Amino acid sequence: MSRYVLRAASLAAALGLWQALTSLKVDLWLRFSQFPTVTDVARAFADRVSGADYWTNLTESLTRILTGFALAAVLGVATGVLVARSRLAEDLLGPVLEVIRPIPAIALVPVAILLFPSNEQGIVFITCTAAFFPVMVSTRHAVRALTPVWEEAVRTMGGGRWRILGSVVLPGALPGIFGGLSVGIGVSWICVISAEMISGQYGVGYRTWQDYTVVNYPGVFVGMVTIGVLGWVTSTAVELLGRRLTRWLPRTSYVPGGRPRAVVPAAVVTVAVQADGESQKQSDAEQQDRDGTDQEARDEHFV
Amino acid sequence: MSTSSEVAVAAAASAPEVARGARLTLGAAVLGRPDAPVLHDVALDVRPGEILTVVGPSGCGKSTLLRTFAGLLAPLAGTVAQDGSPLTGPSADRALVFQEDALLPWRTLRGNVELPLAIKGVSRSERRAQAASWLARVGLSEQAGQLPHRVSGGQRQRAQLARALAGSPRAVLMDEPFGALDAQTRSGMQDLLVEVLRGTGATVVFVTHDVDEALFLGDRVALLAAGRVASVRDVPRPRERGALDDPARAALRRTVLSSFGI
C-alpha cells in the first residue's frame, strides 16, 4: 500500500512543481510565463471531457492503435519465429527487413499516402510498422535462445513441427515476446500521434495539432495529458498480460530495497490486525505482495 | 518403495498393451557431428527388454550414442536400426530422459507427464487419469500441480521418468539421469527405476559415468573408451543390492575400472 502512496506522491509533486513554476511565471532562461498553469489545463480538460468531440477523437486514436498494434503483434511474432527457425526464411526475408528497419515509421507517411486509398488505413499501416520491428526482433532472439533439450524432449515423444511450435517455441519465447510488445506499444503511440498530426482527420494527435495552430495552449496540454494517460494504461495492460502469461518464470525471493518477507500464517495475520491497528497496513501490504508474486501453479497449458 | 506389490499390480493393470521392448542395433557405425566424429566402428546389439548400461569417461561419446539411438543424430556411416528397420528420425517409440532441466518449465509436473499422451491423441480425461497414475507410481501425487522449478532435483528426475514412461515407449534412453543427484537420492532413484520399469517390458539404454550404477542396473554393460566400444559384458546378478560382494561382480568391477585406467 505504501508503494501506491509513494507513486501518487511522485505524480502530485510533479504537478505541484508545474503549478508553482507557471503561476509564479518563472523566467530563468526557461520561460514559464506563457505556460498554462495546472488549473488552466484542468479547466480546459473538464470542458473537453463534457463534450462528445473529445470522446470521438479518443476512440478514433484507440481504434487505430489497437488495430495497428494487434496486426504488428501477430505479424511480428510470426515473422520472428519464421526467421529464427528457418534458414530459407532468414535468407529471403532477413535482408529486406534489415533495410526497412532503420527507416522511422513516421517517414513512411508518403508511402502510406501512395499505397492506401484512405488516411485511416495509412495511419494503421504506420502504427503497425512501428510496432512490428521491436516485436519481430525480440521474438527472433527469444526463439534462438530456447533451451535445445526442450525441443529434443518433445521430438522424442513423437511431436511434430506444429507441436513443437505450440508446446515449446511459443510458450518458451513468451517472456521475450512480451519484452518486444512492451516496447512496441510505446513506439505505436508515438507513431499514431505523429501520423494523426500529419494526416489525420480525427484523433487525439490531430486535435492537439489543431489546438496548437489556433494557439490554444491549454488545449494542447489536454491533448498531451490524454496521450500520456492512454499510453500508460495500454502499456500497463500489456505488462500485466505478460506477467500473467509468464507466471511460470522462476523469480528470486529478493525484494529490492525491502525487508525479507516473512511468511505470516493467515490466522496470525487476523490476530495481529485485531490486536494492533498499526500493523494492519503492514500485513495488508505483505498479503498483497504475496498475492501478486505467489506462483500458484495452474493447470492452464498453451496446448 | 515399500509398496512394491501395489506398484507391480498397477503397472500390470495399466500397461498390458505394451509390446515387448525394441531391439536396437548399430552396425559399423561412425557417430558424432559431421565435423567431429567421436565414435568409430560401433557395432552394438541391444536386446529386446534388456537394460544395457553404457559406461565411459566424460566426453567419450556416451551422449552421442544415445542421441543416435533416439534418432536426433544420424550416423555418419554404417547403420542404426530398430527391430531391423533403419531409423529415420525421432519417434515416440524411443523416449529420451535427460540429465536435468528437460521438463517444460511452464507446465506443471502433471502437465509435463500429460504431454506425450496429448501428442498421442489420448483424450483429456484419459490423459488426466494416466498422468495421475504415473505420478503416483513415482511418488509425486502431492507435487502434481507444482511447476518444475518449485520441486527438488530428485523430484524433477522422477517426473521426467514418469513423462518418458507415460507414452509407453518400447525403448527408454537415459542420459546420466541421476548424474546431478546426491548419492543417497541417487540410490533411491535406482531402486525406483527398477520398480517402475517392471512390467513395461521396455528396452533400456542407460548411460552413466558411475561404474557401480552401471553394474547395479545393467543386464549387460558396454564399455566405451578411446572412441570405440571396448567391450560388452554380462553382469552377474543384476539389480541385487546384495550382489556387491559377489566375487564375479567384484571381478567385473575391477576389469571395468582398469579399462578406464583408474
Image (spheres, coloured by chain):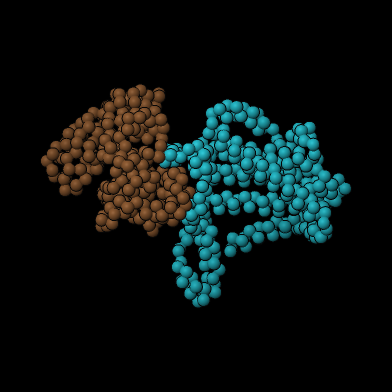
Please name the residue shown 32% across and 37% down the image: B22
Q: Nearest the camera: A28 or A252?
A: A252
Q: Which chain is brown?
A: B
Quarter of the rendering containing residue A105: top right
The C terminus of chain B lies in quadrant = top left
**Position above or below: B28 against A190:** above
Residue B183 seen from this side: no
**Position above or below: B24 against B116:** above
Q: Which chain is cyan?
A: A
The N terminus of chain B lies in quadrant = bottom left
Please name the residue shown 76% across and 58% down the image: A20
Please name the residue shown 13% across and 39% down the image: B248
Q: Position of residue A88 (x, y in %)?
A: 56, 27
Please name the residue shown 34% across and 51% down the image: B14
Numbered circles on residues, count: 0
Quarter of the rendering containing residue A95: top right
Question: Of all residues shown, which one is farthest toward the front?
Answer: B17
Q: Position of residue B192 (x, y in %)?
A: 29, 50
